Each structure stands twice: as C-alpha cells, then as structure tokens.
Image (tube, rainbow, N blue to C red):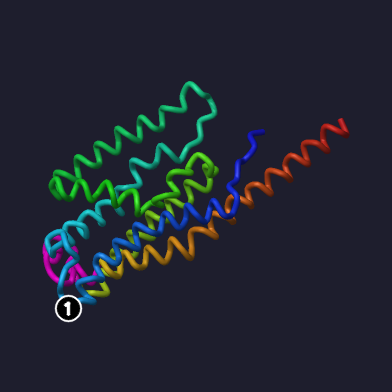
Amino acid sequence: MQVIKTLPLKHLLIFCVAAALPLLLMSLLFNFPLASGGKYFPGTSQLLLGDIIHSAFLAAASGILPLMPLLFSIKHKMFRLVPKIIFAVSGFVCAWFAHAIAGTTGMLFYVVLVFITYGGGTLLIFDWLSSVTRTFLTLLRWSVALFIYVTLQLHLNLEVDIAHWKQTTAAVEFGALYFYILTVLEVVLYPPLTWYLEYRLQGEQRYSLALDGFGQTRG
C-alpha cells in the first residue's frame, strides 16, 4: 500500500497563506479607488479593472479544465509526465479561448487568475496531497467561486452579460467584494479543511495497515 505523505502543520499553513496573499492584493487593488474617492492605484484604471473582472469569470468558470489532469495520481514513473503534458496543452487551449473573448490583456489576467483562484501557492504542493484532497478542494473552489460571482451579480443588480457593466464603477465594487470573500475563504476555510482531509486519510490508512498486519499474523 502506498504511504500517504503529509505536510507538517507549519508548512501547510505557509502554503495556505501564500494562496491567500495574491487574492488579498487583488482585493486591495479594487478597494483602493473606493477608499480614495475614485483615484486608481498607479498603473491601473477603470478599463484595466474591468478586464480583470471579465477574466475572473472566465477563470472561475473554465479554470478547472486544465487543472483536472493534475488531480490524478499516476504511480508508474514512465507516465507521470502525461498529466503535466495534458495540463500544458489544455491550459494553452483555454488561454487561447480567453484571448478570443477578452483580448491579449484578458488572456494574461486569465492565466494569473486561474492560478490564484484555484489555490495559488497550494498548487505547488499538489503532489504532496492525496488525489481525494486535490479533487475535493479543486471542485469546491470551482463551485464556490462561481457561486460567489453569480450571487454578487444578483446582489448588485448587474446584468448577466459582463460586457455591459465591466467598464462602470459597479465593476470596482464587485471586484472588491469578490476578491475579499475569496481571500477570507482561503484563510478561514481551506487550511483546516485540507488539514482534516489529509490526516483523516492518514488515520484510515494506519487503520487499514493495522488490519492487514493483524490478518497476516493470524495467517
């Protein structure tokens, strides 16, 4: 039986904080004009923030597709690169569609937002997490991000077509709320959930090994 590797608590928390920091920075980027009376952070503009909001929806809706090959564990050394190759190809295809929908700037934001929406720094330790944990957390982030996005659209009375409001001040308020909520979830929800899933699996594995050992002893 394959031993489940687990990270020490301090290492797990470091990666979880790393996952939350980009989302926090994105939230501050949208909060800046709200707190400064309409002045945008140097280098940003209403147009840029609108493009980010558009790309955020594309990332939340389709970002799970290129990540799906990474959810599976392959034991055979010869085939371990296959998921990464599929990930690279599918990521390129999704980025190309993002370019067709939102342009070059939107495509670049799409790539960045897929990374930070689906765990950021925790993606770097995917190989340390069990396939069950990876799959559960990825599907959870996907469903939660979409739910929050649509809920905020309804709450702020925004049209379904993002193009109709992404260049308005409503996009700034939307982005501030959206990225702030995702930041809180990355800090409050996902670290303990990751910890629970990994150590529950470890406990089940130890129990299974004990039963196997007991069976062999009796045999």
Q: Nearer the viewer, residue 124 or 197?
A: 124
Q: Residue at x 42, y 54 (%)?
A: 18
Q: Residue at x 34, y 57 (%)?
A: 22
Tell me if residue 208 can be seen. Answer: yes
Q: Nearer the viewer, residue 209 or 181?
A: 181
Report x, y in % for residue 184: 41, 66
Report x, y in % for residue 175: 25, 66
Report x, y in % for residue 119: 41, 52
In the displayed structure, does residue 117 sit left or right of residue 48? right
Name, please, the residue furthest toward the top: 78
Magenta highlight on residue 163: yes
Which quadrant of the structure image shows residue 1?
top right
Mark 1 element type: loop
Q: Residue at x 34, y 40 (%)?
A: 66
Magenta highlight on residue 80: no
Q: Nearer the viewer, residue 210 or 11?
A: 11
Give the residues in magenta. 158-174
For mark 1, what is the residue?
37
Tell me if residue 161 can be seen. Answer: no
In the displayed structure, does residue 153 sit left or right of residue 169? right
Q: Label 1 neighbourhood size at 10 Å, few (<14), some (14-19), many (20+)?
A: few
